[in-house]
Image: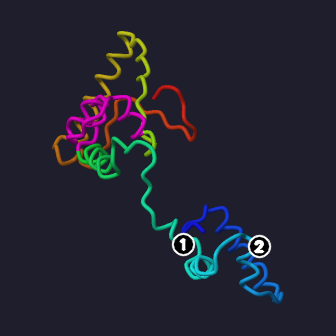
Amino acid sequence: MPAHYPTPVEARLLGAYSFLEDHHIPYFKSELFAHFGVCKNRGWAILHNGLDRRYLAIETRGRKPIITPADLQKMEEILWKYGFAARRLTWKALANEAKVEASSRTIERAMGTLQYRKCIACEKGWVSPSNAVRRVKAAHLALSYRPNPEDWYNIRWTDECYFCILQSGKI
């Protein structure tokens, strides 16, 4: 008899054993082994070890990932550390900063798993000359209220801001 049986045979043997034990049905293990065509020694080994041996195996199928979780973490740290300057980087430039060797498409897909994406900025509208004059007057007025640089520390500046709950095409 073979020393190793296909996993389905072992699984069926364990399933029948588990069922009989759970329902307190009397049986002889030697009959159980004979029913599934497993020798006595191997049958006892299957019952003793179960199918746990499969969960200890390291996955060897498929291609190894190009970008590791550590690489992703390095790229995300760059984005958090350098803020706006880092957000302006292309995917390939971000990979170069993190010293990761991969194509820009691979970087884009990997960063997408962390919910990062790049968008086309919205076009800015035209400003009329009269509106431009009013903006300059408002800036001078704000400067007169806050003449020192430290007066502006609690102010947050943005070029134009758009907030939404769901994703939109352009931001």
The residue to which callout 1 is attached is: 52
Location of the N terminus (image quadrant): bottom right
Mark 1: few, some, or many residues within 10 Å (few <14, many ≥20)?
Answer: few
Q: Nearer the viewer, residue 12 or 126?
A: 12
- Relative to 58, is 40 on the left or the right? right
Q: Residue furthest front?
A: 1
Name which quarter of the figure residue 135 lies in: top left
The residue to which callout 2 is attached is: 35
Q: Where residue 86 appears, x then y in whole percent? A: 26, 37
Q: Where residue 96 appears, x then y in whole percent? A: 21, 35
Main secondary structure type of the part rendered in magenta: helix
Q: Where residue 143 appears, x then y in whole percent? A: 23, 35
The image's mark for residue 153 is none
Part of the protein shown in magenta: 82-111
Report the amino acid beneath label 1.
Asp
Q: Nearer the viewer, residue 64 or 60?
A: 60
Mark 2: few, some, or many residues within 10 Å (few <14, many ≥20)?
Answer: few
| Tag nearer the camera, 1 or 2 | 2
Disc on the earlier residue, 1 or 2:
2
79 versus 58 height, above or below: above
The secondary structure type at the circle numbered 1 is helix
Report the amino acid beneath label 2.
His
Q: Nearer the viewer, residue 171 or 128?
A: 171
The secondary structure type at the circle numbered 2 is helix
Q: Which residue: 24% across, 31% down? A: 93
CA gap, disc 1 to disc 2? 23 Å
Q: Which residue: 18% across, 48% down? A: 150
Location of the C terminus (image quadrant): top left
Colour scheme in the image? rainbow
- Relative to 70, is 58 on the left or the right? right
In the rendered structure, does residue 84 fall within the stretch colored magenta?
Answer: yes
In the rendered structure, does residue 97 fall within the stretch colored magenta?
Answer: yes
